[in-house]
Amino acid sequence: MNKKSLCIGLLIGLPAGAATALLNTPASGRETRGKMKDAQVSAKLTALEVKDNAGQVKESVKRLIVAAKEDVPGVIRNVKVNATLWKESIEPNKQALQSEIASLQKTVEDLQESLPQPVPKK
């Protein structure tokens, strides 16, 4: 959601809703004006609170961006180093497995040659 739209909506919606509620309530002019003044003060306080919260969010995002810029390159480097080390550590096992697979294939071929051939049916 667009922050600007949200703020504008709050700034317009709160006083408009308060005014509508006050004007539709049966009360004397003095009471209605007092209520409207209270609603106006409340709306201003709400707007200031929204502005303060938006400023805090903005600062938090800035700190997060700075931290990410500092930390992400190091994490990427560590992942690359660990991947390289892992590849190096599995290489002997990889070669041993390939030898065993070749040996098993040779054994299967030898067994196939030693088995009698099936006689074709007529």
Image: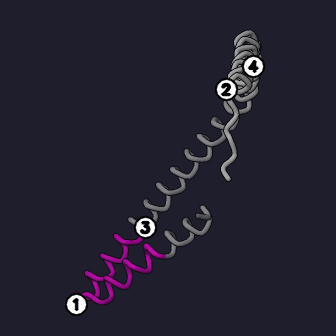
In the depicted structure, whether residue 93 falls above or below residue 1: above
For the residues marked 1 and 3, what is the alpha-carbon distance in whole angstroms? Answer: 22 Å
Q: How many marks?
A: 4
Q: Which residue is mark 4?
A: 106
For the residues marked 3 and 2, what is the alpha-carbon distance in whole angstroms? Answer: 93 Å
Classify 10 Å Cα crowding around label 1: few (below 14), some (14-19), many (20 and above). Answer: few
| Callout in the foreground (4, 1) | 4
Q: Earlier in the sequence, mark 4 or mark 2?
A: 4
Q: Which mark is residue 43?
A: 3
| Callout in the foreground (3, 2) | 2
Residue at 36% across / 77% down in the picture? 36
Q: Which mark is residue 26?
A: 1
In-front residue for pair 93/88: 93
Q: Which residue is mark 2?
A: 115
Q: Judge whether residue 46 is colored magenta.
A: no
Q: Amino acid at mark 4?
A: Lys
In the depicted structure, whether residue 115 falls above or below residue 22: above
